[in-house]
Image: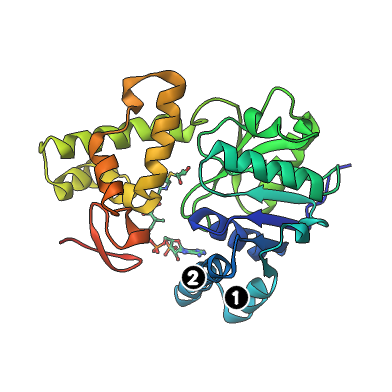
Amino acid sequence: MAREFSVVGVVGLGTMGSGIAEVLARSGVTVVAVEVDDHAAARGRGHIEHSTARAAAKGKLDEAARTELLARIRYTTTMADLADADLVIEAVPENLELKAEIFRRLDEITRPETVLASNTSSLSVTEIGVHTRRPGKVVGMHFFNPAPVLKLIEVVRTVVTEPDVVTDVVEFGKALGKTPVVIGDRAGFIANALLFGYLNHAVRMYEQRYATREDLDAAMRLGCGYPMGPLALLDLIGLDTAYEILDTMYRQSRDKLHAPAPLLKQMITAGLLGRKSGRGFYSYDAPDSPTVV
Ligand code: 3HC
């Protein structure tokens, strides 16, 4: 019989974790949202309130549904509050040691049958799963930014993930209104493996002054029908996150396509992380409105 995922934990309420918590709560799931401290939890709550307010303003969500959605999310700084979760989705920064430590703790806290998922973008789900006593119940559940809007979930199976765990997570993804695809544990899975070489190439073109950022982005939007140009998309993803993904893929494959463009590192060092810091390739007056400086 298929598992029911009625109580789902989300660990980490950054851009992705807060989006994932919103998606879950919107589908009627009870969410236990864990952050390291009250400040981070309040910031996560703020993301969700802002995102759902925008959805309501655009007529995608009525006020009553918004209130119910928000009430389904319980914020906590205590990992032990995940004891009753049927599924936990980890969405902390792309750092293997950090994720390994979280999975070790989740393994102790949750019931043995609880499925543990990572939203990792590029790390090996196998390497994360071996830090538990239940690697057969560990999968990747990779959402795309903005999670409330984009339909894809990459469900990553390792060589030891139990087939029924994959099936149940796929069905759950569909119940969330998403379209899951299943992929083995390879660097970048499907979408990031294809996307990040292109994004990195765009940074190199910009760095070498072949084109302005506006022309670069306009070329891909208007010439190829992409919803955003590559530099605007990097601002949305976060330059630090993009760098970590590229670096991980580069270290795994040594393919120069993924060797992070030097400009990315310089911008990160200077605090230009994209939308989340107010400035990346573009400047942002408000979190959602790009203003070219
Ligand atoms: N809930 C429900 N619907 C929402 C919502 C929410 N919280 N927030 C926005 N929406 C809806 C809007 O109402 C709108 O619906 P409509 O088209 O029917 O009017 C739609 O979503 C789009 O939202 P906006 O109008 O605010 O914004 P845009 O039309 O300008 O689209 C965008 C913005 C969705 C970001 C679009 O430009 C886009 O898809 N860009 C590409 C993003 C992308 O490629 N992401 C992948 C990054 S890679 C990644 O995530 C992997 C990771 O590992 C890094």
Residue 67 at x, y percent in the picture: 63, 79
- Drawn side of residue 285 relative to residue 18, left or right: left
Q: Does the image show residue 270?
A: yes
Hey, what amino acid is under mark 2?
Ala
Alpha carbon separation for disc pair 1 and 2 = 9 Å
Q: Which residue is mark 2?
A: 55
Residue at screen point 39% across, 33% down = 246
Can residue 229 be seen in the rendering of this structure? Answer: no
Disc on res. 66:
1
Whether residue 161 sits left or right of residue 244 in the image: it is right
Residue drawn where x is 26% and y is 32% of the image: 201
Q: Earlier in the sequence, mark 1 or mark 2?
A: 2
Q: In the rendered view, does 47 fall on the left or right side of 246?
A: right
10 Å crowding of disc 1: few (<14), some (14-19), many (20+): some
Q: Residues within 10 Å of mark 2 (few under 14, many from 20)?
A: some
Does the beta carbon of the residue at mark 2 sit less than 8 Å from ligand 1? yes
Residue 275: image location, x then y, percent: 34, 59
Q: Which mark is residue 266?
A: none
Q: Nearer the viewer, residue 155 or 269?
A: 269
What residue lies at 81% left-to-right and 56% top-to-bottom?
A: 83
The image shows residue 46, relative to residue 21, as above or below, that is below
| Disc 1 to disc 2: CB gap under 8 Å | yes
The quadrant the C terminus occupies is bottom left
Circle 1: residue type: Arg
Q: Quadrant of the N terminus?
A: top right
Please provide percent x and percent y for residue 87. 75, 49
Quadrant position of residue 263: top left
Q: Quadrant of ligand 1?
A: bottom left
Q: Nearer the viewer, residue 133 or 245?
A: 133
Residue 285, picture quadrant: bottom left
Place of residue 69 in the rendered image (x, y in percent of width and height, measured from the top left): 65, 71
